[in-house]
Amino acid sequence: MIHRLTKLISRHHNTNISKMTGRLLLAFDFDHTMIEENSDLWVKRLAPGGVLPQEIEDKYSDDGWTHYMGTIFEYLYNIGARQHDIQKCLTEIPLTSGFKQLLDYAHKQGHDCIIISDSNSFFIRYILECYNLENIISKVYTNPAEFDKEGCLKIDLYHHQDWCNLSTVNLCKGHILTEHIREQAVLGHTYSRVVYVGDGSNDLCPALTLSDKDYICPRVNLRLWKKVNAILAGDEKFKKYSLKARVLEWESGTEILKMIKELDSEEV
């Protein structure tokens, strides 16, 4: 089972890892991580009775999520839902407990905060603005979306990948994370550690890219947490995966904030 924070800190105090200086990279998933809901599914409530026609639901597939959402946006437009309706709907989504404090602290300390999400750029940008977080997040990697001249929200793939079977075709989070780190290094910006925070199956890929000085933070009882536990337990289905990062399970942003403060104190 995953170790709690106190066990993690005590376990690593006696390692030979040298003290590292520099800022942290905090990489976040968005839905069910930074916010308490799935923003894509949340806007379904704009449909009559909050229920989509079956022919639209039939278009759902794990590999075709972006196309599925595009069909939903077209349907909502055709029944009269406009940008202001979608925006009002999004304002009802709460931030996950403790995340405002976590992000404010990380920003104040000079750490780099990014989002890697299979949602879309309009939803994420608007929700960040609602909570005055847009200046804290330095980069958002997600599917681009914007309203066309008629007022229908259009969404496109972030990229098209065929190299990672842990990810959807439109978004390999592990590739995005490693490229972000590489690009920052070219600019002369390095990180002492990477902290990846997520909840879903597609967060396993970036977790596997982390080193033994980094942290993977899966939300308790959700898909990533279950997969990480299976790897640590030596489950036969997951034996091909090697997880090097330290693990912090969490239920609120408060637990992650506590860990970040511990790491900052070690750097002093």
Image (cartoon, rainbow, N blue to C red):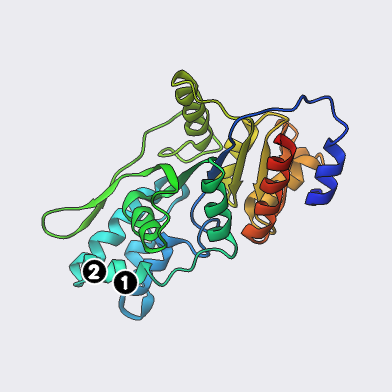
Residue closest to the far bottom: 49
The residue type indicated by label 2 comes to His
Total tally of numbered discs in the picture: 2
Tell me if I can see residue 170 in this picture: yes
Q: Which residue is at 48% across, 20% downward?
A: 188
Q: Which residue is mark 1?
A: 88
Residue closest to the far left: 149
Give yes or no for contact between labels 2 and 1 (Cβ–Cβ under 8 Å).
yes
Q: Which residue is at 37% across, 33% downward?
A: 160
* Dot 2 alpha-carbon crowd within 10 angstroms: few under 14, some 14 to 19, many 20 or more: few
Q: Specify whether 90 is left or right of 241.
A: left
* Dot 1 alpha-carbon crowd within 10 angstroms: few under 14, some 14 to 19, many 20 or more: few
Task: Give the x, y percent position of residue 17.
Answer: 78, 26
Residue 234 occupies quadrant: top right
Q: Is residue 123 above or below residue 112?
A: below
Foreground of the two, 240 or 28? 28
Q: Specify whether 255 is left or right of 40.
A: right
Q: Quadrant of the C terminus?
A: top right
Q: Specify whether 107 is left or right of 214.
A: left
Task: Give the x, y percent position of residue 125.
Answer: 35, 53
Q: Which mark is residue 84?
A: 2
In the structure shown, which secondary structural element does the residue marked by tag 1 occupy? helix
